[in-house]
Amino acid sequence: MEHALLNYVNGQWTRSQAGTYLPVMNPATADVLTTVPLTPAQEVDAAVQVAAEAFQGWRRIPATDRIQYLFAFKNLLEENLDDLARTITEECGKTFNESKGEFRRGIENVETACGIPSLMQGYNNEDIASGIDEHMIRQPLGVVAAITPFNFPGMIPLWFLPYAIATGNCFILKPSEKVPTTSHRLFELLEETGLPAGVVQLIHGGKETVDALLDHPVVRAVSFVGSTPVARYVYERAAATGKRAQCQGGAKNTVVVLPDADLDMTTRIVADSAFGCAGQRCLANSLAVTVGAAREPFTEAIAEAAATRRVGYGLADGVEMGPVITAESKTRIERLVGVAEQEGARVLVDGRGGQVDGFENGYWVFPTILDGLPLDGEIANTEIFGPVFGLMHVESLDDAIALINRKAYGNMACLFTSSGAAARQFRYEVEAGNVGINLGVAAPMAFFPFSGWKASFFGTLHAQGRHAIEFYTQTKVVVERWPREWSRVF
Ligand code: NAD
């Protein structure tokens, strides 16, 4: 087990006593890159105890000093960007440019959290009654944890870590066991910043590790990103021990194309959204609803874009799309395309069984277009999480909005149009937390909340921005009276 990944506990790289280590694969080659421990509950407990102790010192360090570590971290991320991006491509499969792009969004969160001295400020009133003043102070919670998915190994941990520690908490990350090496690299850089021991800890693992964090009475808050069934489970189990929880789940994002949309721009942007990161983005467009006369030209153009997308190893020049994450994922995606056919959809572009020369063992699914999906069928309502794009057709914007609002998920909805009135109606009526107008991936900047709705989110406060500050702090209200007669007055 020489190359097995280590946990990072109490400022030390620590070998887990786990009975099981899983292989971490390069999805383009099926080569084993390393192995990752499924850390057992007693080691989670030890890390939580360390964090609880470290918290007593860390919360007393002024916020202006705490953020110096984040400034240093940001610089290290910039200096190591190419190396980090290569790590993501190797274990996650996305193209090198996509990997760099995701890190950019991660770094943006570190930058935003550097504003904590202002962002964390409270508020107050003098004389709420005669001679009585009232203050609201934000204080950190203590030990907090995040559980993250495979599809953004660099960015998603940074939706949480910078805000959690800047506000004075101690933070434990349990990254996806499919892509743990990127987190390992992140923690090497965090170590270089000289952060005090116990402020951040990295615990690899799977379900047992997650359950140990969820059940631990000392862990005060849990951030989760992953599939909807697990998000719901984490939310419920975290509540059982009185934790705060913000749980981001899956998606089935619909884009509406009106006849007045710019066809070339729409096609290019929608194809990037649907097939970028091999369709494994929670903000991927996976369904298009064309309205009226948009049907024919858009169907033709998107089919052409799908058929001509260059698929291959993410580190090779000119590649626009990598493999999907695992062999199981490939099998599941190809099976769901078969289900769509049985439901009556036409497979306009069939990406099943795709092969890349020199990478015969890779988990390839090429871009796929399904036309005429039945509205209430399985596929129109299932998150496929692969490069499979479905087309549906209606006669009005009202019908398109109604179709979206019937769906269980509410992560993102997009509209392509040149009409301001249509855009306003869509923005106003659509039931989704992230909305794109003439955009295919409406990913909020770090200083806005990542606002999934419905089955795409369980909780109240989302990741990023001001929501993150509120999530990681508890408010304390102090009402005080200082009569003059009690004090010596000079
Ligand atoms: P996943 O739910 O399988 O795993 C996410 C995390 O939960 C991992 O760390 C995993 O180890 C852990 N986990 C898995 N099963 C568990 C269980 N039964 N009990 C406890 N922990 C468990 O998700 P994934 O396949 O890694 O990621 C893809 C999913 O994430 C997609 O559904 C995608 O839409 C979603 N996602 C959502 C967002 C968002 O912001 N809403 C962002 C990225 C990804």
Image (tube, helix red, strand yellow):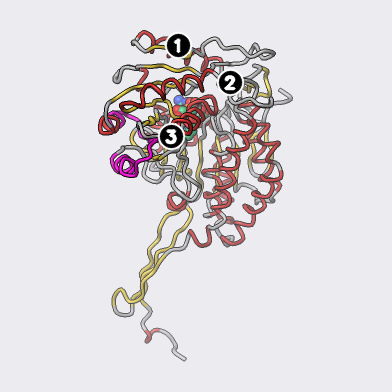
Residue 412 within the magenta-colored segment of the rendering: yes
Residue underneath mark 1: 335
The residue positioned 52% from the left and 44% from the top of the image is 160
**Label 2, label 1: how many angstroms apart (C-alpha)?**
16 Å
Mark drawn on residue 262: 3
Which mark is first along the chain, 1 or 2? 2
Which mark is first along the chain, 3 or 1? 3
The residue positioned 38% from the left and 16% from the top of the image is 371
Q: Quadrant of residue 188?
A: top right
* Residue 12 to residue 231: above or below: below
Q: Quadrant of residue 67?
A: bottom right
Residue placed furthest toward the right:
2
Amino acid type of the residue tagged 3 in the rendering: Asp
Rate crowding at label 2 as few (under 14), some (14 to 19) or many (20 or more) other CA atoms within 10 Å. many
Residue placed furthest toward the bottom:
490
Q: Nearer the viewer, residue 166 or 204?
A: 166
Amino acid type of the residue tagged 1 in the rendering: Arg
Q: Are marks 2 and 1 in contact (CB under 8 Å)?
A: no
Disc 3 beta carbon < 8 A from ligand 1?
no
Amino acid type of the residue tagged 2 in the rendering: Pro
Residue 140 visible in the shown view:
yes
Residue underneath mark 2: 323
Of the 4 image quadrants, the one containing the N terminus is: top right
Residue 291 image offset from top left, x and y in percent: 32, 28
Q: Nearer the viewer, mark 2 or mark 3?
A: 3
The residue positioned 40% from the left and 60% from the top of the image is 476
Q: Quadrant of residue 404?
A: top left
Q: Magenta segment, which residues?
A: 403-429
Residue 208 visible in the shown view:
no
* Residue 324 to residue 346: above or below: below
The residue positioned 52% from the left and 15% from the top of the image is 330
